[in-house]
Image: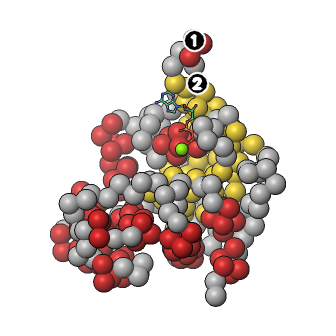
Amino acid sequence: MNDAAGTPVLSARGLRKEHGTGPGLVRAVDGVDLDVGAGETVAITGPSGCGKSTLLHLLGGLERPSGGEVSLNGRRVDGLSEKALARMRRSEVSYVFQSFHLMEELTAVENVELPALLAGRSPRAARRRAQELLDRLGLAGRSGFLPCALSGGQRQRVAIARTLSNEPLVVLADEPTGNLDSAATLDVLQLFEELRAAGQTLVIVTHDARIAASADRTLSMRDGALVDEPWPPGGATGHRGALAGLEG
Ligand SMILES: Nc1ncnc2c1ncn2[C@@H]1O[C@H](COP(=O)(O)OP(=O)(O)O)[C@@H](O)[C@H]1O
Ligand SMILES: [Mg+2]
């Protein structure tokens, strides 16, 4: 399933993001080189403040880099116009946030179909795809529920279903289980495992050792750069197949 030999789905070269100037200068991302192959799941770990969220924002076109390059399927995206960037965010990359970011006044299925509607799909096609996704994620019976009537784990699964609405090239997830209890974390972990099995390319920032262990590769970040030391120090990272040990 991993196609590291082909064109990477996502790549970064010398990627930098600075905030402020002079003595207040913060190098949030400081020279990151990264290639994520088709169908690969990459976990990124590291202490708070090391630049993980900023890196995801740069990769997903939510923030513009101070320097360096980002490419999606071999196409440079760091210099795109605002309009082209917005189009890319609607149709090629998708984002999962720690705090779900569901629209509280929309039902589960309305949340899931929203990106497809914004991308110009017909209402009927968007609804059909949203129902299929909820079905696949074990949420078919919840499609008419408002987010306030869902558990944390169900909310995050709806949020993940929403990111899949447009069949994105890559899903970027920023501490997706940061607000979840252990049982809900397992639900989300299982979901990521299913997405990986289905060939979805994933980049997941996480503090959860189980999520990191289920990835194909785990990268560690320190002070804006990717480094060799694992995080947390001595913690289990980079080992495949964690789910097998968690089932049953
Ligand atoms: N908009 C901003 N303005 C100034 N500094 C920022 C901004 N966003 C992030 N930073 C700083 O950049 C560094 C990396 O932040 P962040 O990417 O959020 O780290 P992480 O997600 O690993 O906790 C931190 O020192 C943070 O304070
Ligand atoms: Mg962060």
Question: How busy is the neighbourhood of tag 1: few (under 14 within 10 Å), some, or many (20 plus)?
Answer: few
Q: Provide residue 136's location: percent of width, then percent of height.
A: 41, 81
Return the x and y of residue 169 as percentages of the image width and height.
47, 60
- Choose between 239 and 107: the one closer to the eye: 107
Q: Residue furthest toward the left?
A: 123
Q: Which residue is mark 2?
A: 26
CA separation, marks 1 and 2?
9 Å
Q: Quadrant of the C terminus?
A: bottom right
- The residue sitting at the top extreme is 22
Task: Please name the amino acid that badge 1 sits on.
Answer: Gly
In the rendered image of this protein, does residue 88 appear above or below residue 30? below
The answer, for residue 186, to whether it is visible in the render is: yes
Circle 2 crowding by C-alpha within 10 Å: few under 14, some 14–19, many from 20: some
Image disc number at residue 22: 1
Residue 66 x, y percent position in the rendering: 52, 27
Where is residue 160, by image quadrant? bottom left
Dot 1 falls on a residue whose secondary structure is helix
User: Residue 204 at what x, y percent from top left?
Assistant: 57, 57
Which of the 4 quarters of the picture holds residue 154?
A: bottom left
- Left or right: residue 202 versus residue 81 is right
Q: Which of the two residues, 99 or 222, is positioned nearer the viewer here?
A: 99
Q: Does the beta carbon at disc 2 come under 8 Å from ligand 1?
A: yes
At horizontal 33% and vertical 36% (from top left) the residue drawn is 82
Q: Residue at x 70, y 57 (%)?
A: 218
Ligand 1 positioned in quadrant: top right
Q: Is residue 146 above or below residue 15?
A: below
Tell me the residue at 40%/37% (across/down).
Answer: 80
